[in-house]
Amino acid sequence: MNRTMTLREKFDILTHKGVEKDIQCLFSRYAFQDGNGQIHFDFFDHQGQPFDTEILSLQRNKKASYGISALNLSDNVRSVFVSDSYASLIYFVNQYKGRISFEEAGFLLIGADFDPNLVKQVFEKMPIKVKVNTVFSSSILGRVMDCKVQDLIHDRACSYRLSNDLIKFENAKKVSSQPIQSFSLRTYCISQGLKQTVRTFKPKKKAVESFYELNQQAWDVFK
């Protein structure tokens, strides 16, 4: 495969979708563009070896199932954004760029399987007072991911499963459930008597689950 590194150049797809060059560069460390114009984002295992890949084409986004990818997580980081999709995170950052201090922002991409040990290793290297933000989809799986990040930060072991129209979650002390429709990190924390310390970002447009989907819809309107 022909790897075209683009640290100084731009990714054709992202440029086409209106993503600014400076923002493209933020996410280019583990990315390359192949001969067909698709962007490949590498995810890594416990030994730091490439293990899985997210692939973004003009009309499709294939997420990575396993691994982790960390960007700009220096000692100066004050705010970290966690997502399971480079595409959604890039489009989110492009939309909210006026509200993000990039000099103090770090980014953490995790595979859809959410390996807690991989994620914990990264968080242990961050400053204690770092502000954590999640950029997952508004689907039930995305909302569970929000809760898993909150659990991990506070060293809580909790399992989640779907049962009919309920999401059931169990920790060492009790088993609880909530309707899927109303379940969120906020309602989860209230039910457990926890202080919510993770801020979640979701698309504000009704019936749109992710920032990738939001960008695709906007592109369909203007192309």
Image (cartoon, rainbow, N blue to C red):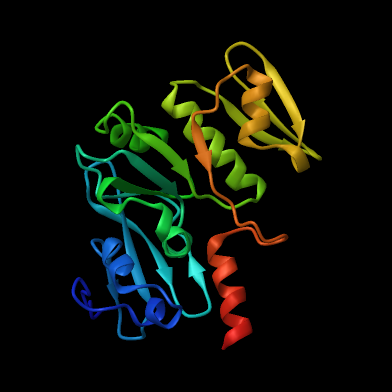
Q: Position of residue 60 (x, y in %)?
A: 52, 74
Instruction: Identify the residue at horizontal 29%, vertical 33% (top origin).
Output: 121
**Foreground: 211 or 41?**
211
| Residue 151 in the image: above or below residue 47 | above
104 above or below 149?
below
Q: Residue at x 29, y 37 (%)?
A: 122
- Residue 153 found in image quarter: top left
User: Residue 130: x and y, percent?
Assistant: 34, 33
Q: Could you tell me residue 12's position as x and y percent?
A: 35, 82
Name the quadrant containing residue 52.
Answer: bottom left
Q: Is residue 88 above or below residue 45?
A: below
Q: Residue furthest bottom?
A: 223
Query: Residue at left 64%, top 56%?
Result: 204
Q: Is 122 situated left or right of 179 in this image?
A: left
178, 211: nearer the viewer: 211
Q: Is residue 114 visible?
A: no
Q: Which residue is at the far front?
A: 98
Q: Position of residue 8 (x, y in %)?
A: 18, 75
- On the rendered structure, is 220 left or right of 149? right
Foreground residue among 160 and 105: 105
- Quadrant occupied by the N terminus: bottom left
Regarding residue 101, the answer to whether it shows in the image is yes
Most distant residue in the top direction: 173
Residue sitting at x 72%, y 61%: 207
* Count of number-bearing discs: 0
Please identify the quadrant where the C terminus is shown.
bottom right
